[in-house]
Image: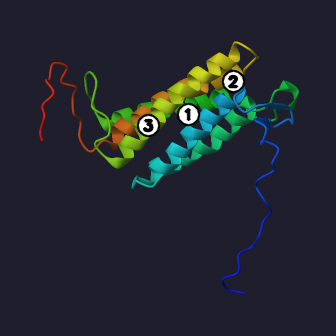
Amino acid sequence: MSGEKKVYGAIYTKGGDKGQTSLYDGVRVGKDDVRVDAYGTVDEMGAYLGFSRSFIEDEDLKQEILDIQNKLFVVNHNLATSDPEKITRHITEEDITVLEKLVDKYMEKAGDFEGFIINGTSPASGVLHIARTVCRRAERRIIALSREVEIDPLVIKFINRLSDVIYSFAKYSESQIIDVEWDKKLEFRG
């Protein structure tokens, strides 16, 4: 029956109509809860990483980004579960080591530079730099959450390393390196 749309069931539950949502372990919290803000920001970063893949031709880099996107579900499983006994998946030291190796690999591939560079000389690098800044915001949200509840220190460490990884991906994806000109005057080009 070509042309017919398969129906999978509604994704709307109406449970959030009053500003509440369910965590992975069924606990109801406000949609503005610091926990929801933390895992929502990680989700946003994952979306930007996915978007970046549409501009990347390097198959290894695309796969490494996809692997990271999968690992972000482990991060969010930790952040979105209020009962530590119900957390079934964890970030490991090996995950951190992989991120560190990725930083080394892509910074070497990108080449030497000194100082700050102007972001976004290619579509891929532009989106990756957005993902990097969202990663830093996610880290701030996770730190805020860790002041209220216990968060696995490896989750915090993973997100901290991940921003460096994304920076290395972005720098590698730049089409050119443009150094910051600190004293450059603005000019009207109209």
Sequence order check: which comes first, mark 2 or mark 3?
2
Three-letter amino acid code at disc 2?
Val
Label number found at residue 34:
2
* Residue 57, image x, y percentages: 39, 55
85 shown above or below 72: above
Three-letter amino acid code at disc 1?
Val
Residue at 69% in and 19% down:
145
Label number found at residue 45:
none
* Residue 179, image x, y percentages: 21, 28
Crowding at dot 3, Cα within 10 Å, few <14 / some 14-19 / many 20+, comes out as many
178 left or right of 102?
left
| Marks 2 and 3, how far apart at CA | 22 Å
Q: Indicate which label's residue lies in the foreground, 2 or 3.
A: 2
| Marks 1 and 3, how far apart at CA | 22 Å
Q: Quadrant of the C terminus?
A: top left
Q: Mark 1 points at which residue?
A: 98
Residue at 42% in and 43% down:
127
Count of residue discs: 3
Sequence order check: which comes first, mark 1 or mark 2?
2
Q: Which residue lies furthest to the top in this view?
A: 147
For the question of whether residue 105 can be seen, the reply is no
Closest to the observer, 154 or 29: 29
Crowding at dot 2, Cα within 10 Å, few <14 / some 14-19 / many 20+, comes out as some
Closest to the observer, 29 or 103: 29
* Residue 92, image x, y percentages: 68, 29
Q: Mark 3 points at which residue?
A: 130
Residue at 67% in and 86% down:
2
Sequence order check: which comes first, mark 1 or mark 3?
1
143 shown above or below 41: above
